[in-house]
Image: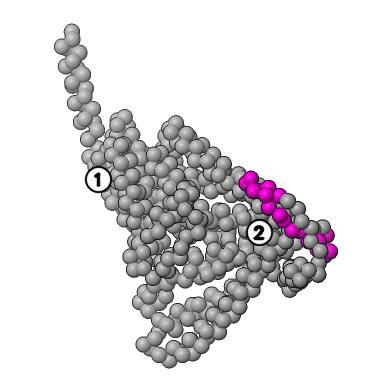
Amino acid sequence: MKGFWKLTGYEWRKIWTQPVVWILLVLFTGYGVYSYSNIQADPELKQVYSYITGPLTQETYETVTTTLQEVEAGKRPVEEEAVTIEGEQLIRQRVKIPQWGGSYNVGYLEQAKYDIEGLMDFEDDRVRIVQQAQKNMQKYQNRPDRLYDYRYNELVYNQASNRGDLVLMEKTGWWNFTEFLGVMRPVNFFDLTALLLCMVALCSIFTKDDECGFTPVVRCSYFGRSTLFFAKMLCGFLFCVATLAILRLGILITLAINTDLSYITAPIQSLSNFRSCPYNVSILEMIVQQFFITVLFLFFFFLVGALAGVLVRRNYISLGVQFIVAVVLTALSLRPDAAQYWNMITNKTSNMVSRQADYSQMVGEDIMKIWNPGMAMRINEYYDHYDYVNVLGFPVSRLALFVSWLILLNAILFFITWKLYTGQRSDHSLVRSRKKGRNHEKSVAHSV
């Protein structure tokens, strides 16, 4: 065991002594922090939400709606002020609210009313779903031919009944964080950067030792081979975790400084993007789940590079194989409307994207959401609506199937790479070095 930890430390230092690792890590983290440093809610909007943030109450709803009704009816005086936004002069209305003290932007009060009514509509939908699921359960209870339908409705009933109370909050920070994690982009840019960093940093972990002649020294026995292999694998996995953690934490800390990220333990359905999420998890729990799923995805590419490195023993070939696999899987994971989103990102079209058919109904995309590891870069789409598959009469979420397949795929690659690495002849590199030595001796003799 002592030898294992020594080898692990050696491999860990070998990864971090590469200058390219530090250059890419600083560049990617700096870009992420810079991208989010200017994302912050208007101070006046934050002021409005400071009075209404939290579990929805009747008092909050009446205060906002009554004020707006009186403004619309002309029963409450408003103050007008001219403001310049992006070179355009606009007129804002402000109204005093005695309960809160001071005056507040009417437009932001309307936004708060919209959010409040959204939560109220969701609660009405939840009650309706629970009632409908109960009716369906009674309908299918004694129907052996509709056993799956009964189990599915039972699942929906339990999830909707046990859902926690939603929280009203100012969501500027969370919206931007979840958008960059895949909701408003074809793929997650920051997961792509983490993937690129891991590919560049780890592609040589199984090739550099062979090139410098260190491998035959350690692998002179069977146990030496396995010990070195597991040390390399552990370092690769830990590097995937560290890389993704640095990128995500940098973004979250930046957002926490600029925006309100309170109520991190609120149900995920509190965010309108995830209003139809089938899982009863908090915002924090979803972030943690997505983090570890993405780590499995990064580790998959490390295993692909490791397998290529063991087979060809060339650094650039290992990196090239990973790059080709990444391009293919990313292309397969793109939405049919990816071109529209690209034009939107590059400001070539309006931010309003026309509604498409429900992607969960597309057979091709359903297949990709189970078997394509690249779908990890669109992980949010597993959380935005009910998506279950009939497996032996039981409803199983497509996310669970995707994660199970990703774990199995990693296990298969791990096993194949281990068998090939430990089965290689230990004298391969020694023979090659002897040939180099003979050629060197001949050249020296000839020169003499």
The picture places residue 14, in percent across and down from the top left corner, at 42, 34
Q: Is residue 109 or residue 271 the one in the foreground? A: 109
Query: For residue 96: magenta?
Result: yes
Name the mark nearer the viewer: 2 or 1: 2
Q: Is residue 46 visible?
A: no
Q: Which residue is drawn at 31% across and 46% down?
A: 324
- Magenta stretch: give its range: 83-101
* Residue type highlighted by circle 2: Glu
- What SS does tag 1 mark? helix
* Residue type highlighted by circle 1: Gly
Q: In this view, does 384 lie above or below 46?
A: below
Q: Residue at x 43, y 41 (%)?
A: 197
* Classed neighbour count for the residue bearing mark 2: other residues with Cα under 10 Å, few (<14), some (14–19), many (≥20): many
Tell whether 189 sits left or right of 367: right
* Classed neighbour count for the residue bearing mark 1: other residues with Cα under 10 Å, few (<14), some (14–19), many (≥20): few
Label at residue 170? 2
Q: Residue furthest top?
A: 448
Q: Is residue 226 above or below residue 147?
A: above
Label at residue 423? 1
Q: Quadrant of the C terminus?
A: top left
Q: Is residue 196 above or below residue 127?
A: above
Label at residue 158? none
Q: Is residue 37 or residue 74 the one in the foreground? A: 74
Q: How far apart are marks 2 and 1 (CA)?
A: 58 Å
